[in-house]
Image (cartoon, rainbow, N blue to C red):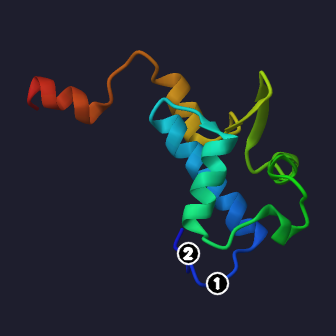
Amino acid sequence: MTTDPTSTPTLDDIFDALQEAAEAAAANGGTLYGAQAKKQLTHQFPDFTERLFGFKKFIELLRAGNDAGRFRLEIIDGHPRITIPSESPVAAQSGADQGRLRADVWSTFIGS
């Protein structure tokens, strides 16, 4: 996704950015937490604030993205965590390949 930092993002732009960030975190074996997500959004969209979209709190925006099916929102010990739906190709890959090396990493070791 290419963004113009001088233009005001749409809610879809925000959801796209959150989904991409959650996918990237999952692909690297990590998790995207709410505070990290907001920091990334304000870096990507300098004028970002949830109030631009009618939300009083960031968690409300995250719930809207969850309700729209763009990503999954889980609250763990009071901390929002953003993950990708299990039907996403990245989620399927990260679950299926657990404990196995990627082909490119394997080929580095065996020298194919």
Q: In the picture shown, does residue 94 fall above or below 90? A: above
Residue drawn at the location 73% of the way across and 45% of the way down: 71
Residue 11 in percent (x, y) is at: 77, 67
Residue situated furthest bottom in the rendering: 6
Q: Which residue is mark 2?
A: 3
Q: Quick one: SS at disc 1?
A: loop
Relative horizontal placement of residue 93, taking residue 13 as reference (left or right): left
Residue 96 in percent (x, y) is at: 51, 23
Checking the image for residue 7, the label placed there is 1
Q: Amino acid at mark 1?
A: Ser
Q: Check if mark 2's residue and mark 1's residue have beta carbons within 8 Å.
A: yes
Q: In the picture shown, does residue 32 fall above or below 39? A: above
Q: Report how many numbered discs are placed on residues in the image.
A: 2
Residue 15 in percent (x, y) is at: 71, 58
Q: In the picture shown, does residue 93 fall above or below 9? A: above
Relative horizontal placement of residue 9, taking residue 57 as reference (left or right): left
Residue drawn at the location 57% of the way across and 49% of the way down: 21
Quadrant in the rendering for residue 34? top right
Relative horizontal placement of residue 87, taking residue 66 as reference (left or right): left
